[in-house]
Structures are given as C-alpha cells and as structure tokens.
Amino acid sequence: MDSQAPVTNESTASGKMHGEPSLMSVLASSCWNCEARTRTEIVYLIPHHDPALGLLSRLGFIQEPLQSPSNMVPLCPTCRANFDSTVDPGFVFLPVDLKYFMQYEENDYQNRCQQLLSGRKIEPRTFPTARNYLDHQIKQGVVRPTATGGLYRRVFFKNFLPPATNMKHLELPKTFNGSPIATIRRAFQALGSLRCGAWSEVRDDLFKLQGLYSRCLPETPDLQDPAKPKRSVNGTRAMVLKACRNRINNLPN
C-alpha cells in the first residue's frame, strides 16, 4: 500500500464508501490538523458507534448521512488517536465565529416559537451548513470569495506532536469544508475535559451555545423523556402560549 494513501480503521470509515467517488480526491496526502505529509485516515466527526445518535438525530445535528464527506476529516494516525479520545482528547477543532451560530439558533428558535403561537406546523430546528458558514464569512470579509470553507480554530489539550512542530502556525485559523455542527458537537464532548486552560477563549461561548441547543419548545418532546411531550403549567393551552411568548421576549437583541 502507498504510504501516502488514506486508510480506514474501526473508528473511521469501514469498507468502501458507496456513492462517494470524490472522497479520495478531497483527501490530501497530509494531515488536516498537524499538516504532516504522511499516511492519513478517514475519520468520522460523528462516528457510527456514537451512543447518542438517536438524540443527535432528533435535535437535527445529523444533517447528512454519516458516510458523507462533510462528516469526515483526514488525519494522521497520531492526530486520529488524540481526536478520537472523547473522554480526554488531545485536540478538537471548531468554527472561529461561534457568535454566528448563537445568533442563528436564536433566530431559528424564535421562528419556531412564532409557528407554535400561530398554530402552524412547527418546522424542525435547522443549523448552519458548511455553505451557510462560508457565505457568512465571505460577507464579513473574513475569507476570500474563492475560499473552499469557513475558518476553524484548533484547540490543543495535550502536547502530543513532535517537538519540532510549529505550534504557533497550528494555532492559526484554518479552512475546513465539512459540517460545522459536527465539529461543534465534538467540542461539546470535550467540555468535560479537566484540561481547562486550553478553553480560555471559547469555553464560555461553547457552554452558552450548548445551553441554546438543549432548549425545548413548550408541548414538544422533553430531552429527558422523548416519549412524553412537555406539559405546561396547569396543562392549559393558554399557559403554553404565555410561556412561549415569555421565551421570545427574553431572547437577546
């Protein structure tokens, strides 16, 4: 086997990727994270064995099939091992502009509240796609119109790379054209890490975003018991509508 060819393992893609003829073409012969020119592995951002797949699907986090290239990133074996350790990860990466995702969620939540108030069908929650995020950053002048993806920051929790690695360079934002919400979900998992120092710039924003995504509308399934709808105070429609109006009024401008 060519030492530069991407490979798979149990935590990455298994078998041939049907219907993805361009998959290998998007994989460079270097690791996306450390940028070392070496053998790469196709790593799932949201893996097939994730025990929370059902919840993620209900919340809308899974925007495309898991085998889609948007759910993949090419990493060297060392970076893969440190990325896959969700309990104590060596690094994660996520969009640099989390405020954009907060505002998007606030707008989406308000739209769904208005749908409930007006008696219309409540549409599923939506998340910014890779294209949405890229278009936003192009509009902000952060990236050029020819960019292939929005900017992401790499957050390192451990010194697992060779001493000669230029860490200053790796701390610079880098483009990625995969699913932004999948990378954010990985970052949520890493919030449980005790290596808190690396989170100084983004931890508070991540906690806030996690709280926004965990909200449920009145009369919609509770995350703790999805089989049962949430009950309003006194079980009356009026109280449900009042609660929804209060939530809209309390949304930040």
Image (tube, rainbow, N blue to C red):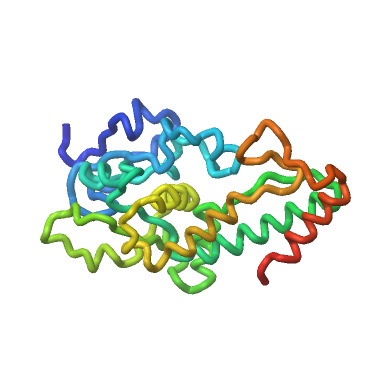
Q: Viewed as shown, does residue 150 lie left or right of 163?
A: right
Q: Viewed as shown, does residue 137 lie left or right of 250?
A: left
**In this view, 18 is above or below 133:** above
Total numbered labels: 0
Instruction: Tell which residue pokes out farthest to the left in this image.
Output: 164
- In percent of width and height, residue 251 lies at 69, 65
In the rendered image, which quarter contains the C terminus?
bottom right
- In percent of width and height, residue 20 lies at 42, 35
Instruction: Tell which residue pokes out farthest to the front in this image.
Output: 234
- Which residue appears at 73% of the width and 56% of the height? 111
**In this view, 153 is above or below 235:** below
- Which residue appears at 71% of the width and 65% of the height? 250
Q: Viewed as shown, does residue 216 lie left or right of 179?
A: right
- In percent of width and height, residue 196 lies at 34, 60
State the image quarter where residue 245 is shown. Answer: bottom right
In the rendered image, which quarter contains the N terminus?
top left
Along the viewing direction, whichever of 135 and 191 lies nearer the viewer: 191
- In percent of width and height, residue 33 lies at 28, 54
State the image quarter where residue 249 is shown. Answer: bottom right
